[in-house]
Amino acid sequence: MRIFKSYLTKKKIKFIDLSNTIKYYGKYTLDGDSHPNSETNKLMAKYLLQKMKLKEQKN
């Protein structure tokens, strides 16, 4: 993840870092897999929408 964020920054590509929003374990992951499940995706979408609204209000 660090290399990817470094690449985006170097290329001046804007991004919102959600990597530390939720610690992926147990109820936040797919069974037998470390990827986020549908509920986690919903939480992340809500969080992202809030961040976008806050940024919009500042502009």
Image (spheres, rainbow, N blue to C red):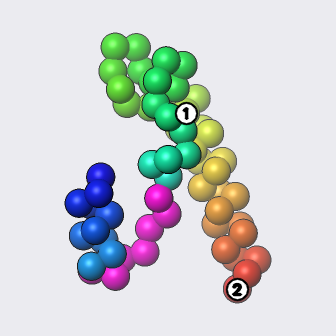
What numbered label is drawn on residue 59?
A: 2
In the rendered structure, the answer to whether residue 42 lies left or right of residue 8 reads right
User: In the shown orientation, is residue 15 left or right of residue 49?
Assistant: left
Residue 12 vertical position relative to residue 19 in the rendered view, above or below: below
10 Å crowding of disc 2: few (<14), some (14-19), many (20+) = few
Quadrant placement of the C terminus: bottom right
Earlier-in-chain disc, 2 versus 1: 1
Q: Depth check: give the residue in front, 25 or 37.
A: 25
State the count of labels.
2
Residue at the image point whose x is 33% and y is 75% from the top: 9
Amino acid tagged 1: Thr
- Magenta segment main secondary structure: loop
* Residue type at the position of mark 2: Asn
Q: Position of residue 24 (x, y in %)?
A: 46, 31
Residue 45 percent location from the top left of the image: 59, 47
Residue 58 in percent (x, y) is at 73, 81
* Callout 2: SS: loop
Stretch of the chain drawn in magenta: 11-17
Residue bearing the label numbered 1:
40
Examine the structure image and report whether residue 2 is included in the region drawn in magenta. no
Q: Secondary structure at mark 1?
A: helix
Q: Is residue 35 left or right of residue 6?
A: right
**Relative side of 21 to 12, left or right:** right
Q: Residue furthest bottom?
A: 59
Q: State the image quarter where residue 14 is shown.
A: bottom left
- Is 34 placed above or below 6 here? above
- Report the residue at 67% width, 74% height from top: 55
